[in-house]
Amino acid sequence: MFFTNYARKVKGKIYLCTKITEMNMNDEILPRGVQRIQLPQNVDERGALSFLEGGKDIPFKVERVFWITDVPEGQMRGAHAHWTCHEALFPVTGSFEIEVDDGERCCTLQMNRPNEGILISAGVWCELRHFAPGTACIVMASQPYDASGYAHDRDEWRRMVKDIAS
């Protein structure tokens, strides 16, 4: 199993959350709740085909799919954490950097292969930046959009994560 359930109290509400518990690919030291995903890739004279199945290649049922394109130079996407939603991100074409932070450990990863993505569990802060021209990133989410489920202020998020841990 990829996730372990636990309760989290945020702004007076209790949420059932999960965190990743399996070892990361190649024993990388990534923030808790972050895991690289490598998908199958079939390559022949016709090109390359990659695929994923919710609940198999990613450990949740996909409730929402969205994509990010045409990000102007110098602009950033993300810059938030979800309190209960998990996401899987893949660079369909092009490249970008993603910074992921669990409140204790932070790292930046280069995303540039369409069959290699990243799984981000609820509670992890992420920022996507340095998009190459023509980049397209697809994101699968475990929940429908809910504006109230986001943390947009990194300092406030850090305080809440610290309070939850203690």
Image (spheres, rainbow, N blue to C red):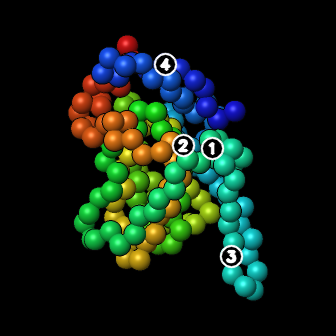
Earlier-in-chain disc, 3 versus 4: 4
Could one spot residue 94 in this view of the protein? yes
Rendered image: mark on residue 7: 4
What residue type is disc 3 on? Ala
Earlier-in-chain disc, 1 versus 3: 3
Rendered image: mark on residue 5: none
Residue 114 in percent (x, y) is at 58, 66
What residue type is disc 2 on? Ser
Q: Distance between the Cα atoms at labels 2 and 4?
A: 17 Å
- Under circle 4, the secondary element is strand
Residue that numbered label 2 is attached to: 142
Q: Distance between the Cα atoms at labels 2 and 3?
A: 27 Å
Quadrant, the C terminus = top left
**Residue placed furthest toward the bottom:** 45
Earlier-in-chain disc, 2 versus 3: 3
Marks 1,2: beta carbons within 8 A: yes
Residue 84 in percent (x, y) is at 46, 33
Residue that numbered label 3 is attached to: 48
Q: Is residue 130 left or right of residue 122?
A: left
